[in-house]
Amino acid sequence: MSPVSILIVFLVYTALLFGISIITSRKATNETFFLGNRLSPWFVVAYGMVGASLSGVTFISVPGWVGDTQFTYMMIVLGYILGYAVISTVLLPLYYKLKLTSIYSYLNDRFGFWSYKTGAFYFLLSRIIGASFRMFLVVNVLQVFVFDNWGIPFWVTVIIFMILINLYTFKGGIKTIVWTDTLQTTFMLLAVIMTIVIILQHLDIGLFDMVRKVSGSQYSMIWESDWQSSKFFLKQFLAGAFITIVMTGLDQDMMQKNLSCRSLKDAQKNVTTLSIVLVAVNLIFLFLGASLFIYAKQMNIAVPELTDEFFPKIALNYLGPIAGIVFIVGLISAAYSSADSALTALTTSFTVDFLEIEKRSDLSERQKIRIRYVVHFCIALVLITVILIFSAINDKAVISKLFQFAGYTYGPLLGLYAFGLFTRFRVYDKWVPAIAVVAPVLTYLIEINSENIIPGYKVGFELLIINGLITFAGLFIVNKKIRG
């Protein structure tokens, strides 16, 4: 597929998003930007959140990851169901009861100023790094297959990409994103399904024959029974549950969409539907990954050292022009889905949690909107910077990096919310930032020494749970009942 063809597909898709933005951002206010005036249909939010939950990481990394981890990722996905159940029954009722715009306002009511700012800071850090991981992955593919051919440097590509996202989200915010996410989810899923169909055509076999091939191959292992392995099924399952709780339930980006629903019941329907659909969708992605490896072996195609390049390599170089177009559309959908909601959520959190714009009675609505515009632009600059930094150090599958990093940054949030929800203790608020710093440091020391602490044991994605427990213990130590 030629660079010009890819660029045309990119521009057409981008124009479509701008069309949706123009329609949804008419007469937009800060309430529209932050919560979509709480009028979003739950089924639209649920469908769009499939794409937002998957992002470019799932689209590219998961198929390539099958070569190293087989289908063991499904245990993480099954853990999602438990995590979403906790979100639906514990967190959403709390957020709706308190009528929150930023979910971290809860920490201010429960513990105090420093706890509130600590929670909001860790979200900003987590989402900036996480969104940058995701965006780097997909923008890098566009760079390799399009812009490198014209001698355009990577940093220029990143800036262009972020300018476009900034332009179509800065006015409508979450109201725009709820609808653009539906478009992006559709194209992402169509890309995966159509790629599988094209592979079957190239191999001249039917779907059920491929299912039998995959199930009888080395890639189909789901259940890792070695408890010392980082892929041990119970560790994966629990990690999936807690990853969902923190990366969805304690994440302003994902919860902002739920809070835009008309009612708590609608938001709960959204979360329950999403948890079921994600199991099926992730299974399709893993099946695609196994199919790609089987196809590569049969066609004597070398697997790249960096497995994130595997799906793009096959789709754009070996499966023909239709597959190339399908892949690019899916990739662009994943790229925009990763970036637009992150930019909106980061703007919301910084504006509400740190600038406290909702409490500023001295500012007119127009002045508040102008401040939000400036924050939106500055957040985009930060994301550009982090993407460029990450491009210099990328060395392994992004999904592995993403979950590992989440263990360190979301752990303090997990501990804070667990302590707030499941105890009645108050804490010495000024000590909370220190605990939130010490907990990740201790978690890192446990990770690098795990095989010495328990011979042969390798810490996996349960880093998040360890970090949360250490934070919880620290809060217990400084609670006012014990400290007097």
Image: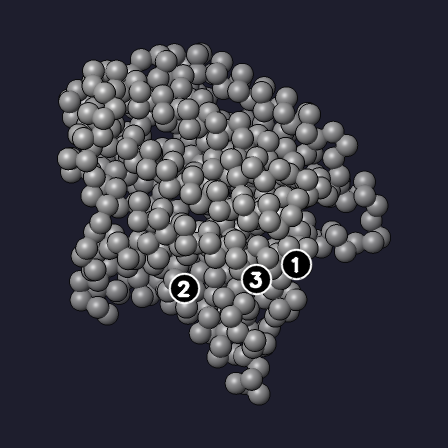
> Which mark is first along the chain, 1 or 2?
1
Disc 1 residue crowd, few under 14, some 14–19, many 20+, Cα 10 Å:
few
Q: Picture coordinates of residue 252 (x, y %)?
A: 57, 50
Residue 42 occupies which quadrant of the picture?
A: top right
Tell me the residue that label 1 is attached to.
97
Q: Residue at x 56, y 37 (%)?
A: 43
* Residues at marks 3 and 1, CA–CA distance in whole angstroms: 22 Å
* Residue 361 visible within the image: yes
Q: Picture coordinates of residue 255 (x, y %)?
A: 57, 48
Q: Amino acid at mark 1?
A: Lys
- Is residue 278 rendered to the left or right of residue 202? right
Q: Amino acid at mark 3?
A: Thr
Residue situated in front as seen by the camera: 1 or 380 = 1
Say if mark 3 contacts mark 2, CB within 8 Å. no
Tell me the residue that label 3 is attached to.
118
Front of the two marks 3 and 2 = 2
* Residues at marks 2 and 1, CA–CA distance in whole angstroms: 28 Å
Q: Which label number is shown at residue 467? A: 2
Q: Quadrant of the C terminus?
A: bottom right
* Residue 350 visible within the image: no
Q: Picture coordinates of residue 20 (x, y %)?
A: 63, 25
* Residues at marks 3 and 2, CA–CA distance in whole angstroms: 15 Å
Compared to 165, does 328 lie above or below?
above
Residue extending furthest toward the bottom: 484
Front of the two marks 2 and 1 = 1
Q: Amino acid at mark 2?
A: Asn
Disc 2 residue crowd, few under 14, some 14–19, many 20+, Cα 10 Å:
many
Q: Picture coordinates of residue 265 (x, y %)?
A: 60, 49
